[in-house]
Image: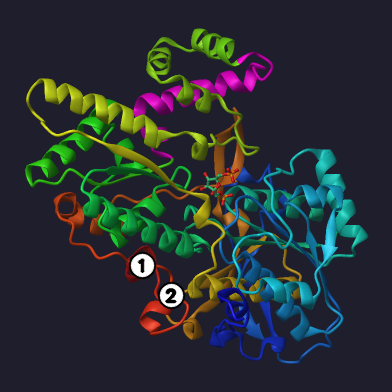
Protein backbone atom coordinates (compact mmCIF):
# COMPACT_ATOMS: atom_id res chain seq x y z
CA UNK A 1 0.00 0.00 0.00
CA UNK A 2 1.25 3.49 -0.82
CA UNK A 3 2.12 5.63 2.16
CA UNK A 4 3.37 9.20 2.39
CA UNK A 5 6.86 7.70 2.70
CA UNK A 6 6.66 5.80 -0.60
CA UNK A 7 4.96 8.64 -2.45
CA UNK A 8 7.20 11.36 -1.05
CA UNK A 9 10.37 9.49 -2.07
CA UNK A 10 9.29 9.86 -5.71
CA UNK A 11 8.91 13.65 -5.51
CA UNK A 12 11.23 15.38 -8.02
CA UNK A 13 12.62 18.65 -6.66
CA UNK A 14 12.92 21.43 -9.25
CA UNK A 15 16.25 23.08 -9.96
CA UNK A 16 16.95 26.72 -10.86
CA UNK A 17 17.18 27.52 -14.59
CA UNK A 18 20.77 28.64 -14.05
CA UNK A 19 21.66 24.99 -13.49
CA UNK A 20 20.38 23.94 -16.94
CA UNK A 21 23.31 22.53 -18.95
CA UNK A 22 24.83 21.52 -15.61
CA UNK A 23 27.79 19.64 -17.08
CA UNK A 24 29.15 22.75 -18.79
CA UNK A 25 29.02 24.96 -15.71
CA UNK A 26 31.78 25.91 -13.28
CA UNK A 27 32.74 28.67 -10.88
CA UNK A 28 35.36 31.21 -11.88
CA UNK A 29 37.33 33.55 -9.64
CA UNK A 30 36.42 37.20 -10.11
CA UNK A 31 39.19 39.77 -10.13
CA UNK A 32 37.86 41.34 -6.90
CA UNK A 33 39.45 40.00 -3.77
CA UNK A 34 37.38 39.85 -0.62
CA UNK A 35 38.40 42.01 2.32
CA UNK A 36 37.96 40.11 5.56
CA UNK A 37 38.66 41.81 8.90
CA UNK A 38 42.46 42.19 9.26
CA UNK A 39 42.46 40.53 12.70
CA UNK A 40 41.43 37.20 11.07
CA UNK A 41 44.68 36.97 9.08
CA UNK A 42 46.74 35.37 11.86
CA UNK A 43 44.08 32.68 12.45
CA UNK A 44 43.26 31.76 8.85
CA UNK A 45 46.20 33.03 6.77
CA UNK A 46 45.49 30.75 3.80
CA UNK A 47 41.88 31.82 3.40
CA UNK A 48 42.62 35.49 3.77
CA UNK A 49 43.16 36.29 0.09
CA UNK A 50 40.24 34.38 -1.44
CA UNK A 51 38.35 35.88 -4.34
CA UNK A 52 34.69 36.33 -5.04
CA UNK A 53 33.45 33.79 -7.60
CA UNK A 54 30.76 33.64 -10.24
CA UNK A 55 29.05 30.88 -12.17
CA UNK A 56 30.13 30.60 -15.80
CA UNK A 57 29.40 28.33 -18.73
CA UNK A 58 32.66 26.77 -19.88
CA UNK A 59 33.60 27.79 -23.42
CA UNK A 60 35.48 24.58 -24.11
CA UNK A 61 34.18 21.68 -22.09
CA UNK A 62 37.16 19.89 -20.54
CA UNK A 63 36.95 16.09 -20.41
CA UNK A 64 35.54 15.33 -16.96
CA UNK A 65 37.82 13.44 -14.56
CA UNK A 66 36.25 11.22 -11.90
CA UNK A 67 35.71 12.92 -8.55
CA UNK A 68 35.60 11.43 -5.05
CA UNK A 69 33.59 13.46 -2.60
CA UNK A 70 33.06 13.07 1.14
CA UNK A 71 30.06 14.49 2.95
CA UNK A 72 29.28 14.92 6.63
CA UNK A 73 26.38 16.19 8.73
CA UNK A 74 27.42 18.37 11.62
CA UNK A 75 25.32 19.59 14.56
CA UNK A 76 21.58 19.20 15.06
CA UNK A 77 19.41 17.73 12.29
CA UNK A 78 17.43 20.02 9.99
CA UNK A 79 14.85 18.92 7.42
CA UNK A 80 16.26 18.63 3.92
CA UNK A 81 19.71 17.26 4.79
CA UNK A 82 19.11 14.05 2.85
CA UNK A 83 18.24 16.10 -0.20
CA UNK A 84 21.60 17.88 -0.02
CA UNK A 85 23.19 14.43 -0.25
CA UNK A 86 20.79 13.36 -3.03
CA UNK A 87 21.64 16.61 -4.86
CA UNK A 88 25.37 15.93 -4.50
CA UNK A 89 24.94 12.36 -5.70
CA UNK A 90 22.79 13.21 -8.72
CA UNK A 91 25.08 16.11 -9.67
CA UNK A 92 28.12 13.83 -9.42
CA UNK A 93 26.50 11.21 -11.66
CA UNK A 94 25.56 13.89 -14.20
CA UNK A 95 29.25 14.75 -14.47
CA UNK A 96 30.76 11.26 -14.62
CA UNK A 97 29.45 7.76 -14.00
CA UNK A 98 32.57 6.83 -12.03
CA UNK A 99 32.25 9.66 -9.53
CA UNK A 100 31.97 8.38 -5.96
CA UNK A 101 30.34 9.71 -2.80
CA UNK A 102 31.37 8.79 0.76
CA UNK A 103 29.42 9.69 3.89
CA UNK A 104 31.38 10.21 7.12
CA UNK A 105 29.38 8.61 9.91
CA UNK A 106 27.96 10.29 13.02
CA UNK A 107 29.28 13.76 12.38
CA UNK A 108 32.79 15.26 12.27
CA UNK A 109 34.11 12.51 14.57
CA UNK A 110 33.68 10.23 11.52
CA UNK A 111 36.22 12.34 9.62
CA UNK A 112 38.69 12.21 12.50
CA UNK A 113 38.38 8.44 12.94
CA UNK A 114 38.00 7.63 9.23
CA UNK A 115 34.58 6.08 9.84
CA UNK A 116 32.70 6.27 6.56
CA UNK A 117 30.45 4.41 4.20
CA UNK A 118 30.18 4.65 0.42
CA UNK A 119 26.78 6.00 -0.62
CA UNK A 120 25.21 4.13 -3.51
CA UNK A 121 22.17 5.12 -5.57
CA UNK A 122 20.08 2.49 -3.73
CA UNK A 123 20.94 3.96 -0.33
CA UNK A 124 20.24 7.52 -1.48
CA UNK A 125 16.87 6.52 -2.99
CA UNK A 126 15.70 5.30 0.43
CA UNK A 127 16.10 8.78 1.87
CA UNK A 128 15.03 11.18 -0.89
CA UNK A 129 12.75 13.94 0.41
CA UNK A 130 12.70 12.35 3.87
CA UNK A 131 13.50 14.13 7.11
CA UNK A 132 16.31 13.52 9.57
CA UNK A 133 20.02 12.89 9.17
CA UNK A 134 19.80 9.16 9.80
CA UNK A 135 21.31 8.11 6.46
CA UNK A 136 24.78 8.75 7.95
CA UNK A 137 24.05 10.23 11.40
CA UNK A 138 25.37 13.47 12.85
CA UNK A 139 27.37 14.75 15.83
CA UNK A 140 28.82 17.86 17.44
CA UNK A 141 32.54 17.05 17.62
CA UNK A 142 34.62 20.17 17.07
CA UNK A 143 37.75 19.43 15.05
CA UNK A 144 40.28 21.73 16.67
CA UNK A 145 43.35 19.97 18.04
CA UNK A 146 46.41 19.40 15.85
CA UNK A 147 45.90 15.66 16.34
CA UNK A 148 42.26 15.81 15.14
CA UNK A 149 43.31 17.88 12.12
CA UNK A 150 46.08 15.41 11.25
CA UNK A 151 43.69 12.46 11.48
CA UNK A 152 41.16 14.29 9.32
CA UNK A 153 43.84 14.88 6.71
CA UNK A 154 44.75 11.20 6.81
CA UNK A 155 41.08 10.21 6.26
CA UNK A 156 40.57 12.44 3.24
CA UNK A 157 43.90 11.33 1.75
CA UNK A 158 43.10 7.64 2.22
CA UNK A 159 39.86 8.06 0.29
CA UNK A 160 41.58 10.20 -2.37
CA UNK A 161 38.90 12.82 -1.85
CA UNK A 162 38.75 15.86 -4.09
CA UNK A 163 36.28 17.59 -1.80
CA UNK A 164 34.76 17.40 1.65
CA UNK A 165 31.28 18.90 2.00
CA UNK A 166 30.30 19.97 5.51
CA UNK A 167 26.59 20.36 6.10
CA UNK A 168 26.32 22.47 9.22
CA UNK A 169 25.45 25.67 11.05
CA UNK A 170 27.59 28.61 12.08
CA UNK A 171 29.89 26.59 14.38
CA UNK A 172 30.27 23.69 11.93
CA UNK A 173 31.12 26.03 9.08
CA UNK A 174 33.66 27.76 11.33
CA UNK A 175 35.12 24.26 11.65
CA UNK A 176 35.03 23.97 7.85
CA UNK A 177 37.08 27.17 7.50
CA UNK A 178 39.77 25.84 9.86
CA UNK A 179 39.93 22.54 7.98
CA UNK A 180 40.21 24.34 4.64
CA UNK A 181 43.06 26.49 5.98
CA UNK A 182 44.82 23.42 7.43
CA UNK A 183 44.55 21.47 4.17
CA UNK A 184 46.05 24.34 2.15
CA UNK A 185 48.87 24.71 4.70
CA UNK A 186 49.66 20.99 4.33
CA UNK A 187 49.33 20.91 0.54
CA UNK A 188 46.37 18.55 0.76
CA UNK A 189 44.42 19.23 -2.43
CA UNK A 190 40.95 18.72 -0.96
CA UNK A 191 38.31 21.43 -1.29
CA UNK A 192 36.31 22.07 1.88
CA UNK A 193 32.82 23.33 1.09
CA UNK A 194 30.11 24.46 3.50
CA UNK A 195 26.33 24.11 3.27
CA UNK A 196 24.15 26.44 5.40
CA UNK A 197 22.07 24.27 7.73
CA UNK A 198 20.17 25.04 10.91
CA UNK A 199 16.56 25.36 11.97
CA UNK A 200 17.64 28.29 14.15
CA UNK A 201 17.79 30.73 11.23
CA UNK A 202 20.85 32.35 12.81
CA UNK A 203 23.18 31.50 9.92
CA UNK A 204 21.95 34.39 7.83
CA UNK A 205 23.80 37.39 6.42
CA UNK A 206 24.28 39.46 3.27
CA UNK A 207 25.19 36.29 1.33
CA UNK A 208 23.02 33.62 2.96
CA UNK A 209 19.34 34.65 2.95
CA UNK A 210 18.16 31.56 4.85
CA UNK A 211 19.58 28.31 6.22
CA UNK A 212 17.85 25.10 5.28
CA UNK A 213 15.55 23.54 7.87
CA UNK A 214 14.16 26.87 9.09
CA UNK A 215 11.20 26.76 6.71
CA UNK A 216 10.10 23.25 7.73
CA UNK A 217 10.68 23.73 11.47
CA UNK A 218 8.74 27.01 11.52
CA UNK A 219 5.84 25.37 9.68
CA UNK A 220 5.80 22.32 11.99
CA UNK A 221 5.88 24.49 15.12
CA UNK A 222 3.24 26.89 13.77
CA UNK A 223 0.93 23.96 13.17
CA UNK A 224 1.44 22.80 16.77
CA UNK A 225 0.89 26.31 18.15
CA UNK A 226 -2.26 26.64 16.04
CA UNK A 227 -3.52 23.35 17.48
CA UNK A 228 -2.68 24.39 21.03
CA UNK A 229 -4.43 27.74 20.56
CA UNK A 230 -7.51 25.93 19.31
CA UNK A 231 -7.42 23.51 22.24
CA UNK A 232 -6.96 26.41 24.67
CA UNK A 233 -9.98 28.23 23.23
CA UNK A 234 -12.06 25.02 23.17
CA UNK A 235 -11.50 23.94 26.76
CA UNK A 236 -11.11 27.50 28.01
CA UNK A 237 -8.96 26.56 30.98
CA UNK A 238 -5.27 26.42 30.07
CA UNK A 239 -2.45 28.76 29.28
CA UNK A 240 0.15 26.92 27.21
CA UNK A 241 3.69 28.13 27.94
CA UNK A 242 5.56 27.00 24.84
CA UNK A 243 9.34 27.00 24.80
CA UNK A 244 10.57 27.39 21.24
CA UNK A 245 13.76 25.77 19.97
CA UNK A 246 16.17 28.01 18.10
CA UNK A 247 19.14 28.58 20.39
CA UNK A 248 19.99 32.24 21.22
CA UNK A 249 18.24 33.93 18.32
CA UNK A 250 14.45 34.35 18.33
CA UNK A 251 13.96 33.96 14.54
CA UNK A 252 11.86 30.80 14.81
CA UNK A 253 9.67 32.28 17.55
CA UNK A 254 9.14 35.48 15.58
CA UNK A 255 8.18 33.54 12.45
CA UNK A 256 5.72 31.39 14.43
CA UNK A 257 4.27 34.51 16.06
CA UNK A 258 3.49 35.82 12.57
CA UNK A 259 2.02 32.53 11.35
CA UNK A 260 -0.21 32.01 14.41
CA UNK A 261 -2.31 33.86 16.96
CA UNK A 262 -0.01 33.32 19.97
CA UNK A 263 -1.11 35.83 22.61
CA UNK A 264 2.12 36.80 24.31
CA UNK A 265 5.49 36.37 22.64
CA UNK A 266 8.90 36.97 24.18
CA UNK A 267 11.66 38.04 21.81
CA UNK A 268 15.10 37.69 23.39
CA UNK A 269 16.71 40.48 21.39
CA UNK A 270 13.97 42.94 22.41
CA UNK A 271 14.37 41.96 26.06
CA UNK A 272 18.09 42.72 25.83
CA UNK A 273 17.52 46.01 24.01
CA UNK A 274 15.17 47.29 26.72
CA UNK A 275 17.29 45.76 29.48
CA UNK A 276 14.23 43.98 30.87
CA UNK A 277 14.60 42.12 34.14
CA UNK A 278 12.93 38.80 34.88
CA UNK A 279 10.50 40.63 37.16
CA UNK A 280 9.39 42.98 34.37
CA UNK A 281 8.94 40.14 31.86
CA UNK A 282 6.85 38.12 34.34
CA UNK A 283 4.77 41.16 35.16
CA UNK A 284 4.09 41.81 31.45
CA UNK A 285 2.94 38.22 30.91
CA UNK A 286 0.65 38.59 33.95
CA UNK A 287 -0.69 41.87 32.45
CA UNK A 288 -1.68 40.02 29.26
CA UNK A 289 -3.41 37.30 31.29
CA UNK A 290 -5.31 39.90 33.36
CA UNK A 291 -6.25 41.84 30.22
CA UNK A 292 -7.62 38.67 28.58
CA UNK A 293 -9.49 37.84 31.80
CA UNK A 294 -11.39 41.12 31.42
CA UNK A 295 -12.73 39.76 28.08
CA UNK A 296 -13.69 36.50 29.79
CA UNK A 297 -10.71 34.60 28.39
CA UNK A 298 -8.86 32.50 30.88
CA UNK A 299 -6.71 30.68 28.35
CA UNK A 300 -4.10 31.39 25.72
CA UNK A 301 -0.68 30.65 24.28
CA UNK A 302 2.62 32.19 25.34
CA UNK A 303 5.82 31.70 23.33
CA UNK A 304 9.23 31.66 25.02
CA UNK A 305 12.33 31.34 22.81
CA UNK A 306 14.67 28.80 24.39
CA UNK A 307 17.45 31.41 24.39
CA UNK A 308 15.38 34.01 26.31
CA UNK A 309 17.30 33.64 29.54
CA UNK A 310 20.56 34.51 27.80
CA UNK A 311 19.09 37.94 27.03
CA UNK A 312 17.75 38.78 30.49
CA UNK A 313 20.34 41.00 32.09
CA UNK A 314 20.74 39.20 35.41
CA UNK A 315 20.88 35.82 33.60
CA UNK A 316 23.36 36.91 30.95
CA UNK A 317 25.69 38.12 33.72
CA UNK A 318 25.11 34.88 35.62
CA UNK A 319 25.76 32.73 32.52
CA UNK A 320 28.96 34.70 31.80
CA UNK A 321 30.14 34.17 35.38
CA UNK A 322 29.19 30.48 35.30
CA UNK A 323 31.02 29.99 31.99
CA UNK A 324 34.16 31.52 33.46
CA UNK A 325 33.94 29.28 36.55
CA UNK A 326 33.15 26.14 34.53
CA UNK A 327 36.11 26.80 32.22
CA UNK A 328 38.46 26.67 35.22
CA UNK A 329 36.89 24.43 37.85
CA UNK A 330 36.53 20.73 37.35
CA UNK A 331 33.10 20.25 38.87
CA UNK A 332 31.92 17.15 37.00
CA UNK A 333 33.16 14.88 39.78
CA UNK A 334 31.40 16.75 42.61
CA UNK A 335 27.96 15.57 43.82
CA UNK A 336 24.95 17.60 42.56
CA UNK A 337 24.17 19.23 45.91
CA UNK A 338 27.74 20.19 46.70
CA UNK A 339 28.22 21.38 43.14
CA UNK A 340 25.43 23.95 43.46
CA UNK A 341 26.77 25.16 46.80
CA UNK A 342 30.36 25.33 45.59
CA UNK A 343 29.45 27.26 42.46
CA UNK A 344 27.20 29.64 44.42
CA UNK A 345 30.15 30.47 46.68
CA UNK A 346 32.40 31.18 43.71
CA UNK A 347 29.94 33.59 42.03
CA UNK A 348 30.25 37.36 42.38
CA UNK A 349 27.54 38.88 44.59
CA UNK A 350 25.14 40.08 41.81
CA UNK A 351 25.08 36.64 40.13
CA UNK A 352 24.96 34.76 43.41
CA UNK A 353 21.71 36.51 44.33
CA UNK A 354 20.09 35.54 41.00
CA UNK A 355 21.39 31.94 41.17
CA UNK A 356 20.20 31.26 44.71
CA UNK A 357 16.64 32.33 43.93
CA UNK A 358 16.27 29.83 41.09
CA UNK A 359 14.59 26.43 41.56
CA UNK A 360 17.16 23.65 41.98
CA UNK A 361 16.31 22.00 38.63
CA UNK A 362 17.07 25.21 36.76
CA UNK A 363 20.31 25.66 38.74
CA UNK A 364 21.37 22.16 37.68
CA UNK A 365 20.36 22.79 34.08
CA UNK A 366 22.49 25.96 34.02
CA UNK A 367 25.48 23.95 35.23
CA UNK A 368 25.24 21.30 32.52
CA UNK A 369 28.29 20.93 30.35
CA UNK A 370 28.58 23.47 27.51
CA UNK A 371 28.45 21.96 24.02
CA UNK A 372 31.78 21.40 22.23
CA UNK A 373 31.52 24.91 20.75
CA UNK A 374 31.08 26.54 24.18
CA UNK A 375 27.31 27.20 23.88
CA UNK A 376 25.02 26.87 26.90
CA UNK A 377 22.65 23.98 26.09
CA UNK A 378 19.54 26.16 26.21
CA UNK A 379 17.25 23.42 24.93
CA UNK A 380 17.88 21.59 28.23
CA UNK A 381 16.87 24.54 30.42
CA UNK A 382 13.19 24.32 31.24
CA UNK A 383 12.47 28.03 31.01
CA UNK A 384 8.79 27.33 30.22
CA UNK A 385 8.46 25.79 33.71
CA UNK A 386 10.40 28.64 35.28
CA UNK A 387 8.00 31.17 33.74
CA UNK A 388 4.93 29.14 34.78
CA UNK A 389 6.21 29.14 38.35
CA UNK A 390 6.95 32.86 38.41
CA UNK A 391 3.71 33.90 36.65
CA UNK A 392 1.67 31.69 39.01
CA UNK A 393 3.25 33.49 41.96
CA UNK A 394 2.71 36.93 40.40
CA UNK A 395 -1.00 36.16 39.75
CA UNK A 396 -1.37 34.84 43.28
CA UNK A 397 0.03 38.15 44.62
CA UNK A 398 -2.36 40.10 42.38
CA UNK A 399 -5.24 37.99 43.66
CA UNK A 400 -4.32 38.97 47.22
CA UNK A 401 -4.60 42.59 46.12
CA UNK A 402 -7.92 41.93 44.31
CA UNK A 403 -6.35 42.71 40.94
CA UNK A 404 -7.13 39.27 39.48
CA UNK A 405 -9.88 36.87 40.42
CA UNK A 406 -9.66 33.77 38.20
CA UNK A 407 -7.90 30.50 38.81
CA UNK A 408 -4.77 30.05 36.70
CA UNK A 409 -3.79 26.77 35.13
CA UNK A 410 -0.77 26.42 32.87
CA UNK A 411 0.70 23.62 30.77
CA UNK A 412 4.34 23.53 29.65
CA UNK A 413 5.15 22.53 26.08
CA UNK A 414 8.40 22.38 24.13
CA UNK A 415 8.41 22.91 20.37
CA UNK A 416 11.78 21.29 19.88
CA UNK A 417 13.23 18.16 18.36
CA UNK A 418 10.12 17.24 16.37
CA UNK A 419 10.77 20.25 14.11
CA UNK A 420 14.24 19.15 13.04
CA UNK A 421 13.60 15.82 11.33
CA UNK A 422 10.18 16.12 9.73
CA UNK A 423 9.59 15.54 6.01
CA UNK A 424 11.07 18.68 4.44
CA UNK A 425 8.66 21.21 2.98
CA UNK A 426 8.88 21.60 -0.79
CA UNK A 427 10.92 24.74 -0.17
CA UNK A 428 13.53 22.90 1.90
CA UNK A 429 13.48 19.82 -0.36
CA UNK A 430 14.27 21.98 -3.41
CA UNK A 431 16.63 24.38 -1.64
CA UNK A 432 18.71 21.46 -0.36
CA UNK A 433 18.75 19.63 -3.67
CA UNK A 434 20.00 22.84 -5.30
CA UNK A 435 22.67 23.39 -2.61
CA UNK A 436 23.95 19.85 -3.26
CA UNK A 437 24.38 20.69 -6.95
CA UNK A 438 26.18 23.96 -6.17
CA UNK A 439 28.57 22.16 -3.81
CA UNK A 440 29.53 19.75 -6.61
CA UNK A 441 30.22 22.66 -8.96
CA UNK A 442 32.51 24.18 -6.31
CA UNK A 443 34.31 20.84 -5.99
CA UNK A 444 34.64 20.54 -9.75
CA UNK A 445 36.04 24.09 -9.83
CA UNK A 446 38.62 23.11 -7.13
CA UNK A 447 37.54 25.95 -4.85
CA UNK A 448 38.08 25.59 -1.13
CA UNK A 449 36.83 27.56 1.89
CA UNK A 450 33.53 28.52 0.25
CA UNK A 451 29.90 28.09 1.23
CA UNK A 452 27.28 27.25 -1.41
CA UNK A 453 24.50 29.82 -1.59
CA UNK A 454 21.27 30.61 -3.39
CA UNK A 455 20.16 34.16 -4.12
CA UNK A 456 16.50 35.24 -4.47
CA UNK A 457 15.05 32.19 -2.70
CA UNK A 458 11.75 34.04 -2.24
CA UNK A 459 11.16 33.76 -6.01
CA UNK A 460 10.09 30.60 -7.82
CA UNK A 461 12.77 27.88 -7.90
CA UNK A 462 13.40 28.44 -11.61
CA UNK A 463 14.47 32.03 -10.86
CA UNK A 464 16.84 31.27 -7.98
CA UNK A 465 20.41 32.50 -8.43
CA UNK A 466 23.48 30.32 -7.84
CA UNK A 467 26.48 31.53 -5.88
CA UNK A 468 29.25 30.82 -3.39
CA UNK A 469 30.80 32.92 -0.66
CA UNK A 470 34.20 32.62 1.07
CA UNK A 471 33.60 31.37 4.63
CA UNK A 472 36.07 33.90 6.01
CA UNK A 473 34.00 36.82 4.75
CA UNK A 474 31.29 35.85 7.27
CA UNK A 475 33.67 35.57 10.23
CA UNK A 476 34.67 37.80 13.12
CA UNK A 477 36.43 37.40 16.46
CA UNK A 478 34.42 36.34 19.52
CA UNK A 479 35.09 35.12 23.04
CA UNK A 480 34.22 31.41 23.35
CA UNK A 481 35.18 29.22 26.32
CA UNK A 482 37.19 32.20 27.59
CA UNK A 483 39.29 32.43 24.40
CA UNK A 484 39.14 34.93 21.53
CA UNK A 485 38.63 32.96 18.30
CA UNK A 486 37.24 33.58 14.81
CA UNK A 487 33.67 32.34 14.35
CA UNK A 488 30.84 32.82 11.91
CA UNK A 489 28.74 35.30 13.86
CA UNK A 490 25.23 34.19 14.82
CA UNK A 491 22.68 36.51 13.29
CA UNK A 492 20.14 37.78 15.80
CA UNK A 493 16.71 39.33 15.21
CA UNK A 494 17.06 42.86 13.82
CA UNK A 495 14.64 45.00 15.81
CA UNK A 496 14.55 47.59 13.03
CA UNK A 497 14.04 44.94 10.35
CA UNK A 498 10.75 44.26 8.53
CA UNK A 499 9.98 41.00 10.35
CA UNK A 500 10.08 42.41 13.85
CA UNK A 501 8.35 45.62 12.72
CA UNK A 502 5.48 43.57 11.22
CA UNK A 503 5.21 41.63 14.46
CA UNK A 504 5.00 44.91 16.43
CA UNK A 505 2.05 46.05 14.31
CA UNK A 506 0.11 42.87 15.17
CA UNK A 507 1.21 42.37 18.75
CA UNK A 508 -1.38 44.30 20.76
CA UNK A 509 -4.27 42.95 18.70
CA UNK A 510 -3.16 39.32 19.05
CA UNK A 511 -2.83 39.66 22.81
CA UNK A 512 -6.61 39.81 23.15
CA UNK A 513 -8.03 38.47 19.90
CA UNK A 514 -8.30 34.76 19.03
CA UNK A 515 -9.17 35.32 15.40
CA UNK A 516 -6.02 33.95 13.77
CA UNK A 517 -6.72 30.79 11.72
CA UNK A 518 -4.66 27.67 12.43
CA UNK A 519 -1.97 27.43 9.68
CA UNK A 520 -2.37 23.61 9.61
CA UNK A 521 0.21 21.03 8.53
CA UNK A 522 2.79 21.34 5.75
CA UNK A 523 1.20 20.65 2.36
CA UNK A 524 3.06 18.46 -0.14
CA UNK A 525 0.29 18.11 -2.72
CA UNK A 526 -2.40 20.50 -3.90
CA UNK A 527 -2.56 24.18 -4.80
CA UNK A 528 0.87 25.77 -5.37
CA UNK A 529 0.02 28.62 -3.08
CA UNK A 530 0.18 26.06 -0.25
CA UNK A 531 2.83 23.63 -1.47
CA UNK A 532 5.32 26.31 -2.53
CA UNK A 533 4.68 28.71 0.37
CA UNK A 534 7.67 30.34 2.05
CA UNK A 535 8.06 31.81 5.52
CA UNK A 536 6.91 35.34 6.33
CA UNK A 537 10.51 36.01 7.42
CA UNK A 538 11.93 35.19 4.00
CA UNK A 539 9.16 37.04 2.21
CA UNK A 540 9.52 40.22 4.28
CA UNK A 541 13.33 40.23 4.24
CA UNK A 542 13.40 39.69 0.47
CA UNK A 543 11.30 42.80 -0.08
CA UNK A 544 13.90 45.04 1.58
P1 LIG B 1 22.48 23.57 15.17
O1 LIG B 1 21.70 23.49 13.89
O2 LIG B 1 23.16 24.88 15.33
O3 LIG B 1 23.38 22.43 15.33
O4 LIG B 1 21.44 23.53 16.38
C1 LIG B 1 20.11 23.19 16.27
C2 LIG B 1 19.51 22.97 17.63
O5 LIG B 1 18.30 22.28 17.40
C3 LIG B 1 19.24 24.21 18.49
O6 LIG B 1 18.07 24.87 18.14
C4 LIG B 1 19.19 23.60 19.86
O7 LIG B 1 19.43 24.54 20.89
C5 LIG B 1 20.26 22.55 19.81
O8 LIG B 1 20.34 22.15 18.45
C6 LIG B 1 19.98 21.34 20.65
O9 LIG B 1 21.12 20.57 20.69
P2 LIG B 1 21.16 19.02 20.97
O10 LIG B 1 20.68 18.34 19.72
O11 LIG B 1 22.61 18.75 21.19
O12 LIG B 1 20.29 18.75 22.14
Q: Which residues are magenta?
A: 307-335
**Residue 323 is inside the magenta segment:** yes
Which scheme is used to colour this image of the protein? rainbow
User: Looking at the image, how many numbered discs can be counted on the residues?
Assistant: 2
Residue at label 2? 523
Is residue 199 among what the camera can see? yes
Residue lying at 45% horizontally and 50% vertically, measured from the top left: 491
The residue tagged 1 is 520
Describe the element under mark 2 as helix, strand or loop: loop
Q: Position of residue 177 (x, y in %)?
A: 68, 52
Q: Please, what is the dominant secondary structure of the magenta stretch?
A: helix
Residue at 85% x, 53% y is: 115
Q: Secondary structure at mark 1?
A: loop
Q: Tell me if 539 is positioned left or right of 396 in this view.
A: right
Residue 238 quadrant = top left
Q: CA distance from mark 1 to mark 2?
A: 9 Å
Q: Residues within 10 Å of mark 2 (few under 14, many from 20)?
A: some
Q: Nearer the viewer, residue 370 or 466?
A: 370
Amino acid sequence: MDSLYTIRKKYKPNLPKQLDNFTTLSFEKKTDQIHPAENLREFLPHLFDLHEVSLVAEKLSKPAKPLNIGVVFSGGPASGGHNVIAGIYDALKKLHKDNRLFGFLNGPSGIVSGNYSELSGEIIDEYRNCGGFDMIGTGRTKIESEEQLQHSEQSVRELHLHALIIIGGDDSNTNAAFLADYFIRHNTPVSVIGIPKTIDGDLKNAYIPISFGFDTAAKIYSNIIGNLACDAASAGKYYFFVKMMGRSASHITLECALQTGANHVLIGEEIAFHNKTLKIIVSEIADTICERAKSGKNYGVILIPEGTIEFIKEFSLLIGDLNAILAHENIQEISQENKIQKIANLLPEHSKECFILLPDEIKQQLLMERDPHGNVQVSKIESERLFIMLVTKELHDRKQKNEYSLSFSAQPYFCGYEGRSAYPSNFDAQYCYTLGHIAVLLAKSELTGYMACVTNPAKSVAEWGIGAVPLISMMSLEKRKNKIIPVIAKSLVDLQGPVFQTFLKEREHKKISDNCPNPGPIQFFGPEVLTESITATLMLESKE
